[in-house]
Image (cartoon, grey):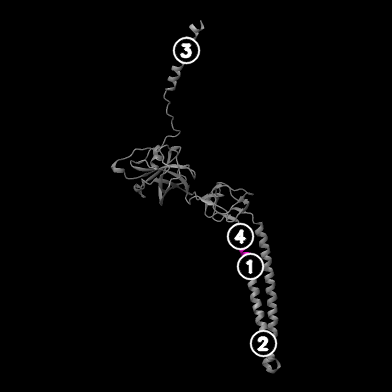
């Protein structure tokens, strides 16, 4: 009975389940909607490129000129500093000890100079007496004794000059150590804002260029956007053309940009947007545009989509949207 009735029912149920499972798997998956709608190009013909916001002074990587442990950090992220304001200080206690020794050397050299001056004054006094006697009676003083006194004065004058040189050398040593101490205090090179602080009191700071700068500064009174223009579109770029930048994530926030300069050296593209049509082996011409910081809420390092008005290719117009900016910047034809 089991074989006659139960097995066919189980087989039929399995067949029905298989059919339903296959049909469910063939149901088309609805396309996911973007988090934010891409911006439409504001020009009929244009060059599109991804841009990175940077400070007007460009981003200034601050490092230490002398290696050592950080003694104190005087600023925090977001602070505005003026030229010459202290940023952080390297431990200089060993240099302070050297400075004390150098200052003591100056005191010693000055004392030796005073002794040499007094000795010279005594020798000059003795020579003047011998010279007076010789002028009155040449036979009263022998020539050897007279010359001995005269040469003693010359030796004393040389000793004074040597002592003065030692004082100058000791003072130069103090000045040199003071310069080294001054170098342990890192100061702001321009009026700017502190963008990053990657150093803390007690940490060791190496001197020279570092992959991760100790501090990142920038003049953010006015912002720049560095646009990567594909080398295939570089010939269409006009420096007097209008340009408009759209904020990534909210295409309703945009601002017109003012041309600053073209960096006339085509470089490999480094800023990637993640688009599937984007080429990573392309080379780009970097163009800088400026806009007021108050125009839109944007931060240094943020990406923007930039459209630059350009003559159409072959007389045709384009109607692309910013969703294809990465493809255009990577070499897709306009």
Which numbered disc covers residue 11? 3
Question: For numbered disc 3, what is the local secondary structure?
Answer: helix
Q: Say whether marks 3 and 4 touch (CB < 8 Å).
A: no
Q: Residues within 10 Å of mark 2 (few under 14, many from 20)?
A: few
Measure the alpha-carbon separation of dots 1 and 2. 36 Å
Question: Quarter of the image holding residue 135?
Answer: bottom right
Badge 4 or badge 1: first in the primary sequence: 1
Residue 102 pos. (x, y %): 66, 65
Q: Is residue 84 magenta?
A: no
Which numbered disc covers residue 157? none
Q: Residue furthest left?
A: 315
**Mark 3 against mark 2, which lies toward the viewer?**
3
Which numbered disc covers residue 147? 2
Report if residue 216 is visible in the image.
Answer: yes
The overriding secondary structure of the stretch rendered in magenta is helix
Badge 2 or badge 4: first in the primary sequence: 2
Measure the alpha-carbon separation of dots 2 and 4. 49 Å
Q: Residues within 10 Å of mark 4 (few under 14, many from 20)?
A: some
The residue under the point 70% across, 81% down is 122
């Amino acid at each position: 009975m089991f074989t006659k009735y139960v097995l066919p029912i189980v087989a039929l149920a399995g067949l029905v389940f298989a059919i339903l499972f296959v049909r469910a798997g063939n149901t088309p998956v609805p396309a996911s909607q973007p988090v934010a709608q891409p911006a439409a190009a504001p020009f009929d013909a244009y060059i599109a490129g991804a841009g990175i916001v940077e400070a007007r002074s460009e981003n200034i990587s601050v490092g230490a000129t002398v290696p050592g442990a950080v003694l104190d950090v005087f600023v925090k992220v977001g602070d505005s500093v003026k030229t010459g304001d202290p940023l952080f200080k390297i431990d200089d206690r060993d240099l302070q000890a050297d400075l004390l020794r150098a200052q003591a050397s100056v005191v010693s050299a000055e004392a030796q100079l005073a002794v040499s001056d007094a000795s010279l004054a005594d020798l000059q006094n003795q020579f003047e007496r011998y010279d007076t006697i010789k002028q009155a009676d040449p036979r009263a003083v022998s020539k050897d004794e007279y010359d001995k006194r005269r040469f003693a004065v010359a030796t004393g004058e040389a000793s004074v000059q040597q002592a003065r040189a030692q004082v100058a050398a000791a003072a130069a040593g103090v000045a040199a150590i003071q310069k080294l101490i001054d170098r342990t205090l890192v100061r702001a090179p321009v009026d700017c804002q502190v963008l990053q602080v990657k150093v803390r009191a007690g940490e060791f700071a190496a001197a020279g260029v570092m992959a991760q700068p100790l501090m990142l500064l920038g003049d953010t009174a006015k912002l720049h956007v560095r646009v990567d223009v594909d080398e295939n579109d570089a010939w269409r770029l006009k420096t007097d053309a209008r340009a408009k930048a759209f904020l990534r994530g909210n295409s309703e926030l945009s601002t017109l940009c003012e041309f600053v300069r073209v960096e006339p050296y085509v470089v490999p593209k480094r800023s990637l947007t993640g688009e599937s049509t984007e080429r990573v082996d392309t080379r780009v011409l970097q163009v800088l545009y400026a806009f007021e910081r108050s125009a839109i809420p944007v931060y240094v390092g943020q990406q923007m989509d930039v459209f630059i008005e350009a003559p159409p290719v072959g007389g045709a117009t384009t109607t692309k949207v910013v969703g294809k900016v990465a493809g255009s910047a990577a070499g897709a034809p306009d």
